[in-house]
């Protein structure tokens, strides 16, 4: 496993500069490199492309390209918690993971709810059926925790070094207006599936995407730019592997926030720069008393503890936070991580028009 300590200054600059805001133009590495030079990092377009390729090959990046917002493409996803008894742990996990609808699954440190997974489906009504199947197969109750409010989803991970604030070249792209369309055309569906695992690492990634789906290059540029503005794409750039950058402490903080304060507290916690995800989710009486989730990441246990304390201090400005009103569930093991596959969800949300 690589860590941020093994990165050169140039590699650090690239990781920091473009975790979003990458230009949507014919040869995007040229203006991207020019912006880095203006910010004091000497690099050519060819060197920038080669650096991104190398970081990708070494696993420092998960991919380069667009981070697709699955929620806006179609279908639904939900977070689910359950208990796997110690003497049947592997058996229960294998049964859960065998479901193709299960995209992520983590073991988390909790005295009872130690298995946490995401169910992704084309039709929201399918969630109940999947959970019923898992309960029948395992003999364990599942606790569905669908998102009620989203306050932040922005998993950016900076490293010490140049351009920590990032660069934003999102203004370099076609002049297109967002639409209110929620469904996809067949061509848009093909585009989403082509880019979900990243762009080609070439001088002309958008032209190469266009060739792969047999569409006009200008249409691809305009559609990607429009999707970015509509929220179907969260951001465009390098997508780091946060474990490779040293962010090994993954803490899911959970809070029993008074209901009338959730809409006030949520945005305040989400504004903390190290909080990557923040949601309101339902409680489960007698089992799960928490309704606000805030995910933090740290490069050491001490850094993680400091960040959790900052979340607590932010909460405490609005209500009297007791020791029983919150918890932090650290992930101890990745049990499954296939990513949310979009094909079925996109297919179900595609119509000709």
Image: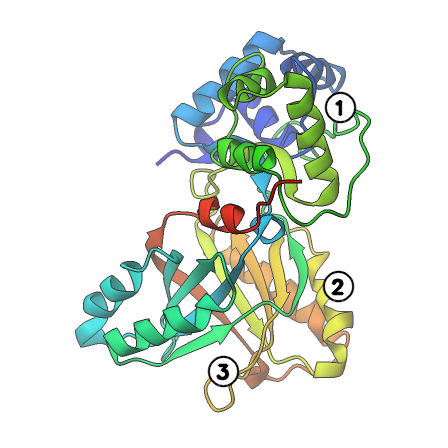
Which residue shows up at 62% across the image and 65% down it? 279
The outermost residue toward the front is 353
Q: Quadrant of residue 219?
A: top right
Q: Earlier in the sequence, mark 3 or mark 1?
A: 1
Helix, strand or loop at mark 1? loop
Helix, strand or loop at mark 2? helix
Q: Nearer the viewer, residue 68 or 330?
A: 68
Q: Position of residue 347 (x, y in %)?
A: 50, 46
What residue did someone put label 2 on?
268
Q: As drawn, is 162 to the left or to the right of 243?
A: right
Q: Earlier in the sequence, mark 1 or mark 2?
A: 1
Query: Callout 2 environment at 10 Å: few (<14), some (14 to 19), or many (20+)?
Result: some
Helix, strand or loop at mark 3? loop
What residue did someone put label 1 on?
173
Q: Is residue 159 visible?
A: no
Q: Position of residue 152 (x, y in %)?
A: 67, 56
The outermost residue toward the bottom is 286
Q: Position of residue 147 (x, y in %)?
A: 59, 67
Whole-number angstrom distance, CA of label 1 to CA of label 2: 32 Å
Which quadrant is the C terminus positioned in? top right
**Residues marked 2 and 3 touching at CB (< 8 Å):** no
Compared to 39, does 325 lie above or below? below
What residue did someone put label 3 on?
288
Q: As drawn, is 235 to the left or to the right of 76?
A: right
């Amino acid at each position: 496993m690589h860590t941020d300590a093994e990165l050169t200054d140039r590699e650090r600059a690239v990781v920091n500069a473009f975790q979003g805001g990458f230009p949507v133009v014919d040869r995007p590495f040229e203006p991207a490199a020019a912006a880095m030079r203006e910010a004091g990092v000497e690099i050519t377009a060819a060197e920038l492309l080669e650096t991104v390729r190398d970081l990708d090959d070494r696993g420092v990046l998960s991919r380069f390209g667009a981070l697709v917002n699955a929620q806006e493409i179609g279908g639904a996803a939900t977070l689910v918690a359950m208990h796997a008894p110690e003497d049947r742990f592997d058996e229960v996990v294998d049964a859960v993971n065998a479901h193709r609808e299960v995209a992520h699954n983590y073991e988390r440190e909790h005295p009872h709810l130690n298995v946490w997974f995401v169910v992704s489906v084309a039709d929201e009504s399918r969630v109940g059926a999947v959970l019923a199947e898992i309960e029948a197969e395992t003999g364990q109750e599942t606790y569905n925790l669908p998102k009620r409010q989203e306050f932040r989803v922005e998993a950016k991970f900076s490293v010490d070094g140049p351009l920590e604030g990032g660069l934003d070249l999102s203004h370099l792209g076609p002049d297109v207006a967002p639409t209110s369309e929620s469904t996809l055309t067949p061509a848009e569906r093909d585009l989403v599936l082509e880019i979900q695992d990243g762009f080609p690492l070439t001088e002309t990634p958008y032209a190469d995407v266009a060739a792969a789906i047999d569409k006009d290059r200008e249409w691809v540029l305009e559609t990607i730019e429009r999707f970015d503005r509509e929220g179907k794409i969260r951001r465009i750039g390098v997508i780091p592997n946060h474990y490779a950058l040293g962010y090994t402490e993954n803490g899911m903080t959970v809070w029993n926030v008074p209901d009338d304060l959730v809409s006030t507290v949520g945005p305040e916690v989400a504004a903390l720069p190290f909080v990557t995800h923040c949601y309101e989710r339902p409680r489960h009486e007698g089992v799960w008393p928490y309704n606000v989730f805030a995910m933090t990441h740290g490069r050491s246990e001490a850094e993680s503890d400091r960040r959790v304390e900052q979340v607590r201090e932010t909460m405490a400005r609005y209500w009297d936070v007791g020791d029983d009103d919150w918890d932090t569930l650290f992930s101890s093991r990745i049990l499954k991580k296939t990513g949310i596959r979009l094909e079925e969800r996109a297919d179900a949300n595609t119509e000709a028009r």
